[in-house]
Amino acid sequence: MRREKMGKFLAIIGLGGVVLFFLTSCASVEKGISVLGQKTKISSEDAKSLVQVAQAFRSSFADITEEEEYYIGRSVAATVLSQYKVYKNTSITKYVNHIGQAAVLYSDRPEIYAGYHFLVLDSDEINALAAPGGFIFITKGLLRLCRNEDMLAAVLAHEVGHVAAKHGLRSIKKSRLVEAFRLLASETAQRSGSANLSKLVSTYEDILGDITATLIERGYDRKFETEADALAVKFMTRAGYSPHALSDFLAALVSSSQASSGKGWFKTHPSPEKRLAKVSATIKALPQVPAVAEVRTQRFRQYSSRLK
């Protein structure tokens, strides 16, 4: 195995110099690495590094810890930011984070490894994205579509729902994780560490690709979008926002000038018309529904007027 291979792997999973090592107690893998060190010319230092890489994968997304999810999400977020520019407006960014954190506080998963982070993208495209680990993005175009704070809260609660339900991690093909685990736990891994590490690097890139393609190109499965809508209604109601704002947002999407563009939200989300009926039924079943507060609407207008 070559140190440059290890360096490439760490560069991929470490954003800003932070290295991701998944923690597991896979004794069989470590035993295999020990055998590898004894039967080949691999150095003890490289053998130790390979053990660390071997600890980086399991066979199911459900086994991934919150810390691991955070670093995977950072890598995905970096990819998103390579395709979109950040909107440089501190006051609007703080405002969006304020509303987003309200949804987080009343979500089913309010505490995660490094907290939730909301960022506005400098794009007129109507879109919102949620990467694993609490990295949530919305565009200027989406902000302009909202008519009040409750509609903004609806969008952010929907994205928080994706994170809370780990939809990003669930978009990883199980075969990716199984293959990564197999490369390091099999007898083959004990005899050809360098070649397998190269494959492992490629497999990790594919794992990130699965999530990124879901966010930007394919969109989540319809069942995930339905679940995120239901969670948004629940989180908004708990926080005191009107869940009807989600229906209002979907209706605004239907009449949007970008509805036929095939870009952004319209590319990665199911038809808003189809979602409206389900959301309306969910809201109708609620025993009590908060109303839209004028003070929140005034606050939204104050901030949205600063959009350029």
Image (tube, rainbow, N blue to C red):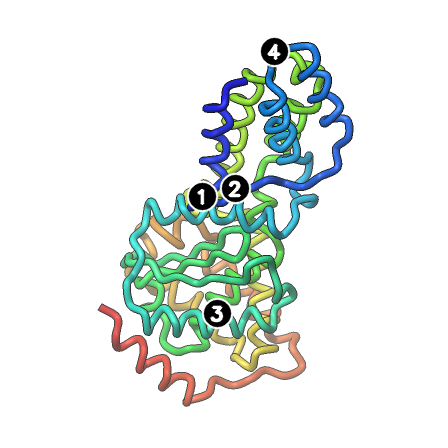
Residue type at the position of mark 1: Gly
Q: Which residue is mark 1?
A: 17
Disc 1 crowd rating (10 Å Cα; few below 14, some 14-19, many 20+) is few
- Give the residue drawn at x 39%, y 78%: 148
Q: Earlier in the sequence, mark 4 or mark 1?
A: 1
Mark 2 vs 1: CB contact within 8 A: yes
Q: Is residue 80 above or below residue 293?
A: above
Locate the N terminus by quadrant: top right
Assign a secondary structure to mark 4.
loop
* Towards the viewer: 213 or 283: 213
Query: How far apart are the two marked residues, 4 and 1, measured between alpha carbons?
Result: 29 Å
Q: Nearer the viewer, mark 1 or mark 3?
A: 1
Query: How far apart are the two marked residues, 3 and 4, measured between alpha carbons?
Result: 53 Å
- Give the residue drawn at x 42%, y 89%: 294
Residue type at the position of mark 2: Val
Q: Which residue is mark 2?
A: 19
Query: How far apart are the two marked residues, 2 and 1, measured between alpha carbons?
Result: 6 Å
Q: Which residue is mark 4?
A: 41
- Give the residue drawn at x 56%, y 22%: 197
Query: How far apart are the two marked residues, 3 and 2, measured between alpha carbons?
Result: 28 Å
Mark 4 vs 2: CB contact within 8 A: no
Residue 305 in the image: state x and y as whole percent.
26, 77
Would residue 294 appear left or right of 220 to someone viewing this image? left
Q: Earlier in the sequence, mark 4 or mark 2?
A: 2
Residue type at the position of mark 4: Lys
Query: How far apart are the two marked residues, 1 and 3, measured between alpha carbons?
Result: 28 Å
Residue type at the position of mark 3: Gly
Would residue 113 appear left or right of 209 to someone viewing this image? right
Assign a secondary structure to mark 3.
helix
Q: Which residue is mark 3?
A: 100
Q: Earlier in the sequence, mark 3 or mark 2?
A: 2
Assign a secondary structure to mark 2.
loop
